[in-house]
Amino acid sequence: MGHIHQHDTEAMGDRRLLAAIAANMLLTLAQVVGGILSGSLALIADALHNFSDAAALLIAWVARRIGRQPADHLKTFGYKRAELIAALINLVVLVVIGLYLVYQALWRVFEPQVIQGWTVVIVAGIALAVDVVTAMLTYRLSKQSMNVRAAFLHNVSDALASVGVIVAGTLILLYDWYWTDTVLTLVIAGYVLYQAFTLLPKTIHILMQGTPEGISIDEVIKAMEQVDKVLNVHHVHLWQVDEHRNSVEAHVVIADFADTETVKAALKQELEQRFAIAHSTLEFEVEHCGFGRC
């Protein structure tokens, strides 16, 4: 029953992602058309951000399906890291988009264009509604996946950007402040780059088999050495298989091989309960004494 419930939950999550992808693709098309008709670079900038969100959701959806494949003789740890690879692709694309928007905004300073404020306000209002709906669709999934969480944060930032675009369009209508469009484009680009550079280090850290966040390798060694009959722990490697699974391998020195199973069980229990390390590979060694030395 548990397996069936999990399958139903995953299927529902996939449907939510597909609905969010469809909504963002339609929104991107509407914003591009509106930006071209109105001459608003900020609207096109927001459209590019929405397109990156749709692409991120699509890649995350594909990665989720790949990640559910069981381990085999080629991928003995399974395929869960497909989602991390997808996150890395999405973040790199975000950096490129952010830098492109900065370039376009600075170029617009030297070649200003007339902007139709009403078109900007109407299209941005539609964008705000779609962003809110998309954020609602992905909120629950964002708690379980780095990819979906990144997409969720992008949608929230899109909603804020849409609010900013509406404000800029209103200022253009009331006061002819066309410069607000350029300023807003730079703000959106800055936020895109901020998000990308915030999430990139964590994604790369996991792919580089870095130590899990919040876990000190010294504390792990100390806790293992405090287990009864453990004399020494060395050659320790601690890493994340994916964002939900931590692993460790270590050499454990004990006095008698007869205590191996007892010590192993105690160590595994300590690692799982204290550090949430469910997978551990332990190699046991016996302290040998000879010629008066140990």
Image (tube, rainbow, N blue to C red):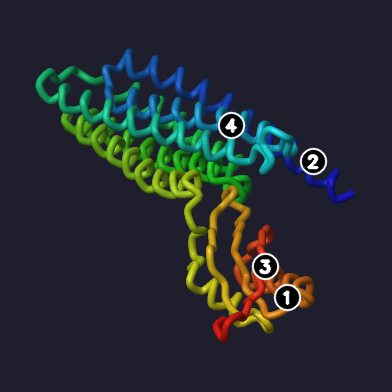
Q: Nearer the viewer, residue 44 or 215?
A: 215
SS for callout 2:
helix
Residue receiving disc 2: 7
- Precedes in sequence: disc 4 or disc 3: 4
Q: Nearer the viewer, residue 89 or 2?
A: 89
Between label 4 and label 3, give the one nearer the viewer: 3
Q: Which mark identifies residue 284?
A: 3
- Precedes in sequence: disc 2 or disc 1: 2
Residue occupying the point 60% across, 68% down: 275
In this rendering, would 221 be left or right of 154? right
Residue receiving disc 4: 20
Residue receiving disc 1: 263
Q: How many numbered discs, if any?
A: 4
Could you tell me if the residues under marks 1 and 3 are in contact, i.e. CB atoms within 8 Å?
A: yes
Q: Nearer the viewer, residue 287 or 3?
A: 287
- Precedes in sequence: disc 2 or disc 3: 2
Report how far apart the C-alphas of labels 4 and 3 lie in the structure.
51 Å
Circle 4: residue type: Ala
Report how far apart the C-alphas of labels 2 and 1 lie in the structure.
37 Å
Circle 1: residue type: Val
Circle 3: residue type: Phe
Q: Position of residue 185 (x, y in %)?
A: 26, 32
SS for callout 1:
helix
